[in-house]
Amino acid sequence: LEDGSFVWELLASDGLSGVATVAWQYPGEEVWYALAAKDGVYGGRFETCRLLVPPDIKPATKITVRVRDLAGNSTDLVVTVPEAEKAD
């Protein structure tokens, strides 16, 4: 995008009860930001969500993504923000 932000698609999965929520967190912050399911509804075993990466988060920054399942369990994963793909 023109302001330096870009969209990053993430795939969350839960093999038993299904994905309930996905959220992400800036490094060193306490606030979690919810991500919307691409299809608009969580609950499936595989859910794609989109993260609008703001321009202040540079490639190679590590962020934490939290996936919570319908049974109430959650898993945190530290992921590295990729380079934005160049549009043709």
Image (cartoon, grey):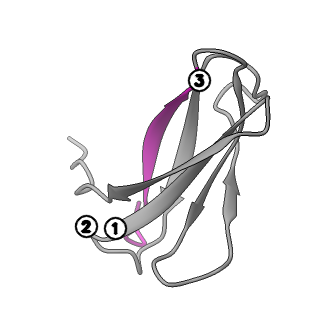
Picture quadrant of residue 38:
top right
Q: Amino acid at mark 1?
A: Lys
Q: Nearer the viewer, residue 6 or 24?
A: 24
Q: Amino acid at mark 2?
A: Pro
- Residue under label 1, please give it: 62
Q: Nearer the viewer, residue 19 or 59?
A: 19
From the top left corner, tell me how far across and down residue 9 is, in percent.
45, 39
Q: Residue at x 46, y 38 (%)?
A: 10
Picture quadrant of residue 20:
top right
User: Which stretch did the figure color magenta?
Assistant: 1-14
From the top left corner, tell me how far across and down residue 24 is, in percent.
57, 60
Q: Is residue 79 left or right of residue 11?
A: left
For disc 2, the neighbor class at 10 Å (few under 14, some 14 to 19, many from 20) is few
- Residue under label 3, please give it: 14
- Give me the C-alpha separation between circle 3 and circle 1: 23 Å
Q: From the image, which quarter does the N terminus lie in? A: bottom left
Dot 3: element? loop
- Residue under label 2, please give it: 59
Q: Amino acid at mark 3?
A: Asp
- Give me the C-alpha separation between circle 3 and circle 2: 27 Å
| Nearer the camera: disc 2 or disc 1 | 1
Considering only vertical position in the picture, is 61 above or below 50?
A: below
Residue 6 lies in the magenta-colored region: yes
Circles 3 and 2, Cβ within 8 Å, touching? The answer is no
From the top left corner, tell me how far across and down residue 32 is, in percent.
67, 67
Dot 1: element? strand
Q: Earlier in the sequence, mark 3 or mark 2?
A: 3
Picture quadrant of residue 2:
bottom left
